[in-house]
Image: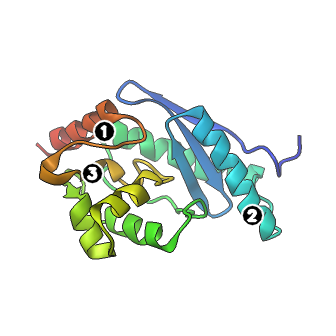
Amino acid sequence: MDSDSHPPSAAIEHPLIGRLYILCSPRGIAGVCFRSEEYLQGVEKLAAVYRENSQEVFSSGLSAFYRDSVVQIKEYLDGKRRIFDIPLDLALTISQYQRQVLAEVIKIPYGSTATYGKIAGIAGGTARSAGSANAKNPLSIIIPCHRVLGSGGRLCGYGGGIPVKEALLRLEAHCLL
């Protein structure tokens, strides 16, 4: 196995949300996945992106990104962190519109929410297109797509499932008290 085809692995197990898989690149954290198959797809996509640019994708030099990512996500899940300061790699983000939507989502403050309609109003498009872009967020929790709700504050659509979305919103609400 060469270092170009298999990343170092990092997974977090936490009682609040179960298992998360972390994917890093030479630029920073590139993926936070709830399912192993999402993680493996992310590995393949990231390798393809970097191969096109003739860059090494996975190397031992990524250990600091993995370490920092794991520490900061655990701190968040334990209610001890509100803002992440990990370098982000949006190489797995597929469209300019998705990047615009995620740029608005990342601005939603800890403990607050916004609707898909509001995000769409700022980024352009419809609530449905904003929801679709948000659903492809490769950096769940880091880019807080769990803070985006349907019209009327309805909980809908989350890669980790609605119970995890609800748990993350409760965590943030509780930590603000």
| Left or right of residue 21, residue 136 in this image | left
Question: Amino acid under label 2?
Answer: Tyr
Q: Is residue 42 visible?
A: yes
Q: CA distance from mark 2 to mark 1?
A: 32 Å
Q: Earlier in the sequence, mark 1 or mark 3?
A: 3
Q: CA distance from mark 1 to mark 3?
A: 8 Å
Q: Indicate whether 54 appears above or below 18.
A: below
Lateral position of residue 89 relative to residue 14, left or right: right
Looking at the rendered structure, the secondary structure element under dot 1 is helix
Residue at x 24% of width, y 72% of height: 121
From the image, tell me which residue sits under label 1. Answer: 165
Mark 1 touching mark 3, by CB under 8 A?
no
Colouring: rainbow
Q: Amino acid at mark 1?
A: Lys
Q: Residue at x 23, y 42 (%)?
A: 155
- Whole-percent x, y for residue 134 in the image: 39, 56
* Location of mark 2 (residue): 50
Would you say residue 106 is visible in this rendering?
A: no
> In which quadrant is the C terminus drawn?
top left
Give the secondary structure at mark 3: helix
Left/right placement of residue 125 relative to residue 150 reads right
Name the residue that disc number 3 marks.
Answer: 147
